[in-house]
């Protein structure tokens, strides 16, 4: 009997050790592979006209959650939707790297609370510092440091953009080198850990865009996917004021209708939506109404159209182009751009090396070359050139 118990205990120990090893070695990469599928794998082909036009464009994307997964962005990874080699192949000049610090279990676009924390498990699997386990601010700072480490190791292919001087120097550099300019944003002001003073900490780490909410309501504002879906709180109004003082962009992605109304009522600078769809082509709780499109454009902001099915009600470049066309018809062509949500736990029709497929789809939708140049990145470049800190 004792021998049987010893054998059972030894087997159980081996199983536990095996599970622990599997969790810490493989769980993060498997999770990314499952949550970020690409429908059509590269290489991608487009018409000669689209290829030639795309090579002349300054392409910019306002949203990718690639830092969440902890992999080396300088490596051309089979699992990734975005990394530096793919950005270079896709002729992407500017990429916003947006940081996720907490998401709820079973997240959906209708109703979520803040009682669960998926990112805690991911942080454990990635063996992140212990301080990240109980601080969302530290999780954001860890991801920001990772981006700087990737830039330092990129051999000049990835450049961090934090102000107008950085941006101007990068634009000049792009004339002779296909480098990528990366800038930092955050999904949800819960990353402040409830302390507005942490806004300074995040600013000095390079963050230049923050959305009040992500998938749940917080002490700053209500989410479109929260329980109560309220508007800005008093702290939220102070958050917007301090964001504008620092020349940081307020991002209304995931904001409740009341939050959108409240922000637009007090905003004195351009407001953006980094990744969204439009109800005119895809009517659901995640997407913007015509009135919201007009009012966001009136601030001088840019609306980034997403690439996934919930945003555009389709799984191809033409669906993305149709949403862009609708948004441009309502907000004006100078206020629409790309907001892929690559690596954001979404299924997409192609990875970023296939962005020329959007150029081809925009041609098919009847846009002029000049308007395509604005949509594919010119509008975002203009916005950042005007709105970033000195």
Image (tube, rainbow, N blue to C red):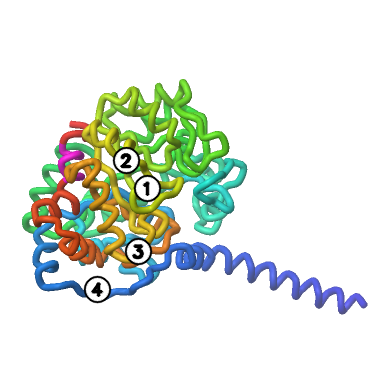
Q: Quick one: label 2 or label 3, which is nearer the N terminus?
A: 3
Q: Quick one: label 2 or label 4, which is nearer the N terminus?
A: 4
Magenta segment's dominant SS is helix
Rendering quarter of residue 386: top left
Name the outermost residue toward the right. Answer: 1
> Badge 3 local density, few (<14 within 10 Å), some, or many (20+)?
many
In percent of width and height, residue 81 lies at 35, 63
Report the side of 125 relative to 13 (left or right): left
Q: Is residue 30 magenta?
A: no
Q: Would you place residue 288 above or below residue 258 in this image?
A: below
What label does residue 290 carry, if any?
2
Q: Nearer the viewer, mark 4 or mark 1?
A: 1
Q: Are marks 2 and 1 in contact (CB under 8 Å)?
A: yes
Q: Which residue is mark 4?
A: 44
Q: Which residues are magenta?
A: 379-385
Q: Which residue is mark 1?
A: 279
Q: Which residue is mark 3?
A: 81
Q: Secondary structure at mark 3?
A: loop
Q: Secondary structure at mark 2?
A: helix
Marks 2 and 4, how far apart in space? 33 Å
Q: Nearer the viewer, mark 1 or mark 3?
A: 1
Nearest the camera: 47 or 17? 47
- Looking at the rendered image, the quarter that the C terminus falls into is top left
Q: Quick one: label 3 or label 4, which is nearer the N terminus?
A: 4
Q: Secondary structure at mark 1?
A: loop
Q: Quick one: label 4 or label 1, which is nearer the N terminus?
A: 4
């Amino acid at each position: 009997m004792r021998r049987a118990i010893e054998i059972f205990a030894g087997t159980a120990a081996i199983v536990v050790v095996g599970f622990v090893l599997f969790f810490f070695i493989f769980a993060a990469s498997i999770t990314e592979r499952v949550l970020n599928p690409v429908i059509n794998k590269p290489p991608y082909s487009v018409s000669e006209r689209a290829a030639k036009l795309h090579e002349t464009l300054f392409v910019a994307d306002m949203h990718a959650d690639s830092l969440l997964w902890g992999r080396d962005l300088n490596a051309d990874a089979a699992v990734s939707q975005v990394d530096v080699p793919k950005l270079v192949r896709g002729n992407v000049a500017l990429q916003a790297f947006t940081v996720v610090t907490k998401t709820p279990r079973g997240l959906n676009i209708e109703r979520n609370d803040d009682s669960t924390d998926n990112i805690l498990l991911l942080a454990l699997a990635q063996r992140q510092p212990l301080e990240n386990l109980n601080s969302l601010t530290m999780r954001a700072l860890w991801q920001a440091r990772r981006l700087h480490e990737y830039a330092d190791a990129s051999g000049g292919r990835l450049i961090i953009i934090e102000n107008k001087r950085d941006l101007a120097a990068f634009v000049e550099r792009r004339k002779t080198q296909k480098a990528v300019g990366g800038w930092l944003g955050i999904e949800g002001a819960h990353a402040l850990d409830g302390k507005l003073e942490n806004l300074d900490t995040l600013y000095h780490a390079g963050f230049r865009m923050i959305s009040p909410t992500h998938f749940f309501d917080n002490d700053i504002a209500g989410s479109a996917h929260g329980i109560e879906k309220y508007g800005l709180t008093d702290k939220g109004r102070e958050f917007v004021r301090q964001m504008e003082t620092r020349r940081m962009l307020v991002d209304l992605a995931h904001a409740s209708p009341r939050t959108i109304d409240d922000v637009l009522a007090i905003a004195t600078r351009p407001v953006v939506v980094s990744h969204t769809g439009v109800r005119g082509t895809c009517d659901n709780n995640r997407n913007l109404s015509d009135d919201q499109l007009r009012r966001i454009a009136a601030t001088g902001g840019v609306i980034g159209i997403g690439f996934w099915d919930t945003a555009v009600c389709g799984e191809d470049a033409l669906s993305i182009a149709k949403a862009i066309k609708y948004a441009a018809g309502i907000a004006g062509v100078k206020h629409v751009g790309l907001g892929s949500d690559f690596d954001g736990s979404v299924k997409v029709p192609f990875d970023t090396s296939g962005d020329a497929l959007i150029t081809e789809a925009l041609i098919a939708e009847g846009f002029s070359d000049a308007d395509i140049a604005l949509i594919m990145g010119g509008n975002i470049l203009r916005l950042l050139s005007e709105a970033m800190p000195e």
